[in-house]
Amino acid sequence: MAFLIGLILGVVYFGGLYLIVQRITSFKHPGFIMAISFVIRMGLLLIVFYFIAQKGIKDILLALAGVILVRVIMIFKLKEPVSSSLKKG
């Protein structure tokens, strides 16, 4: 159960980051929006981890593994391919 919660947290955290970065140029105050986004995402992550911590270290590690797995998957899925001209030079 903790691993599933970690997966959901990872999707919310990194998905929210992805959405904000995609739309950052449309905001009047992009730095402020990034800061607010970080505080909200990190606050949610810490609150949920606080409640998971009450069950023990095993559950914290499982939830953390879920968050990290989502991060790794998103990095590989969203990575832009390097153009062939950059590979040569």
Image (cartoon, rainbow, N blue to C red):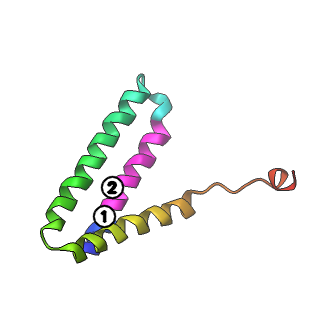
The percent position of residue 81, horizontal first and vertical second, equals 69, 57
The answer to which image quadrant residue 56 occupies is bottom left
The percent position of residue 64, horizontal first and vertical second, equals 33, 67
Q: Residues within 10 Å of mark 2 (few under 14, many from 20)?
A: some
Residue nearest the viewer, comparing 10 with 28: 10
Up-down relation of residue 61 to residue 45 (above or below): below
How far apart marks 1 and 2 lie (CA) works out to 6 Å
For residue 21, side relative to residue 89 (left or right) = left
Which residue type does callout 2 highlight?
Answer: Val
Q: Is residue 42 magenta?
A: no
Region of the chain picked out in magenta, as a range: 8-23
The answer to which image quadrant residue 35 occupies is top left
> Does residue 30 appear in this view?
yes
> Which residue carries the number 2 mark?
12
The percent position of residue 89, horizontal first and vertical second, equals 87, 50
> Which residue carries the number 1 mark?
8
Q: Are marks 1 and 2 in contact (CB under 8 Å)?
A: yes
For residue 31, side relative to residue 5 (left or right) = right
Helix, strand or loop at label 1? It is: helix
Residue sitting at 33 percent across and 55 percent down? 12
Residue ranking furthest to the front: 57
Helix, strand or loop at label 2? It is: helix
> Does residue 1 appear in this view?
no
Up-down relation of residue 25 to residue 64 (above or below): above
Looking at the magenta stretch, what is its main secondary structure?
A: helix
Residue sitting at 50 percent across and 30 percent down? 25
Residue sitting at 82 percent across and 56 percent down? 87
